[in-house]
Image (spheres, helix red, strand yellow):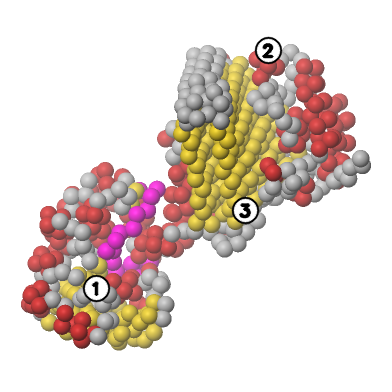
Amino acid sequence: MSIQRSEAETAYLEAFAEAGEVLPKAQWLEPARQAARDSFAETGLPHRRDEAWRWTDLRTVLDTGFPPALTGSQSEVPAGVKSPFTALDRHVIMFVDGHLRAELSDYEGLCGAAQCVCIDEDLDDAPQWLREKFGSAFTDEHDAVSALNTVFLTGGIAISVPAGTKVDKPVELIFVNTGTEPQTLNTRCLLVLGDGAEITLLETHLGVGDGRYVANSWTEVFLGTGARAEHIKVQNETASAVHLANTHSVIGAGATFNSLCLSAGAQTTRNQIKSRLDGEGGHVGIAGAYMLSDRQHCDTALMVDHAVPECTSGELFKCVMDDHARGIFQGKIIVRPDAQKTDGMQMTQGLLLSETAEFDAKPELEIFADDVRCTHGATCGELDEDQMFYLRSRGIPADEAKSLLIAAFIGEAVDEIESEEIRDLVKAYVAELRDGAGDGS
Amino acid sequence: MLEIKNLHAKVEDQPILRGIDLTVNPGEVHAIMGPNGSGKSTLSHVLAGRDDYEITEGSVSYKGEDLLEMEPEERAAHGLFLAFQYPIEIPGVATMTFLKTAVNSQRKLRGEDELATPDFMKLVREKADQLKVSQDMLRRSVNVGFSGGEKKRAEILQMAVLDPTLCVLDETDSGLDIDALRVVADGVNALRGPDRGMVIITHYQRLLNYIVPDHVHVLSAGKIVRSGGKELALELEESGYAAYEADAA
């Protein structure tokens, strides 16, 4: 059978050979890399025939090759590129164009409490926990996004927090992409929490100017028994960028993983969020917010797997689409036959600010146990005219009234964050983004 | 300050207001009474600038300016306030934030400096105490989870804080028990003054026992069919609106 390959596919396949020479050495990782290479060579970029990719045509989005960024750049980070969490006392690990930049980072304090391994370097001496957990959360399929990340991975960090350790302050991973060249930037974060360990992980993706690039990021979180993690991701790539992301979590008994993903930037965003409740009494909360305008496209494919009894999960997505933007939410909850007493709740809401904006929601429940409570709902609407008139009748100009209502709508997802300080910073950032959008129109 | 002349308005080809004439001078309290469907609430919404209505004839001038040309927020900044019959719930917007945004938006539209936060807080606390609006209510989202009485007290609180020159109260008494009515009426009476005009729209005379009007008008089928002093309200309480509904038919 002859296969017609796209330009991007050919470029990636050709880069495989070159990459082998340059990438960090890791014998133990070779089988995984080889499997990913083989898988990509066989299936290439996803077709829209594939149900999971029904709404996002990666073959069109990646119309030309975006060669992997194999070597580090020394690009400056412009002063205007600022994390929403700058005011927060936190550990900072900074990546520029897919590579860790030690001189821009400040996480010595973290290394005292946890073990940190920089993935930019050769990994032949990687500790056992890293080898064991790396890429192991969900191994059932090799999709193109995961395969490319595995093969071309150039930078990232692996953090192991020992049992009982509470990391003193939030850890922020900042990924700044300058887009000076049309590259693919492949980064990885692995977080392993021992029993009862606690951490707040902030993940900020920032684009510079109008650079065109593909950011492929993968975050994996493993929570031991009774561990707690809060994960807040803010994505504000450039307006021409493509953001592809895997966020995987495996939740142990009595552990809690609470997350928020704010998608505001990038031309095309694909969030693949997977979570497995692996021990009784675990909880996962996944909140999401979209702030899309122009022709932005954001597709979240979410899967929560209740593998054991007595776990709870909650998903809340609040999606705002303006102009010709398109938001997609595909959310699947699986309740395995053993997972009795599961309590799962999913709600997704779209707010359309223009007649040409679009929102598609596909909630799915696959329930194989009989004693469970699972609810899901999806709504889509416009700004409420009565609310608009009420605000305006009090002297609040239309544009400001609109901003207030949008902030309130998104705020419901942001309120899922436990830390009040971080909540306020995210809300302030949402307001800032909205003001920026207002200035442009 | 308010001069309505021959005002006609329709909604979806259905004429609702059919030639209203009304003049309100500073310091005057006018009550507009009338049966259901006579156009009372439409009048209040047209004055506040709701765009569901088409003005087909007539004019409204307010402090010498054409009110109908102004956006709702401009009308508010010029001192017009509408207390809603059914105050709108706005989840996710704290009452305090809403009040502050409203006050400062109006000041900005008028070219005044924004009110400093401590001054604003002091102002709100003082007015809130008078109207028995709790600190908890101020922290909650606008009108969300408020009882009927709380919503109306919150409306009057907004009115007190925004300090308008023309207050339009649309069926403010509806859904209030006698104690709540008294609190609301005290709040309104406290705002009466020589520079402020009020238009009180009500179906029942009851409210007018507490807020005594200078003038009473009967609205029927989109027109003011009779005007008089406060004694007219009592007469209506006796005889009902039947006579006026017959007129309209």
Q: Amino acid at mark 2?
A: Gln
Q: Is residue A135 left or right of residue B167?
A: right
Residue A434 forms part of the magenta stretch? no
Residue A335, percent across and down?
A: 55, 30
Q: Residue at x 15, y 59 (%)?
A: B181
In this rendered view, identify the residue nearer to me: A283 or A433: A283
Q: Which residue matches tag 3?
A: A326
Image: B198 above or below A187:
below
The kind of secondary structure element at disc 3 is strand
Residue B95 forms part of the magenta stretch? yes
| Whether residue A262 can be seen here | no
Q: Residue at x 81, y 34 (%)?
A: A40
Dot label at residue A128: 2
Q: Nearer the viewer, mark 1 or mark 2?
A: 1
For the residues marked 1 and 2, what is the alpha-carbon distance in whole angstroms?
79 Å
Dot label at residue A152: none
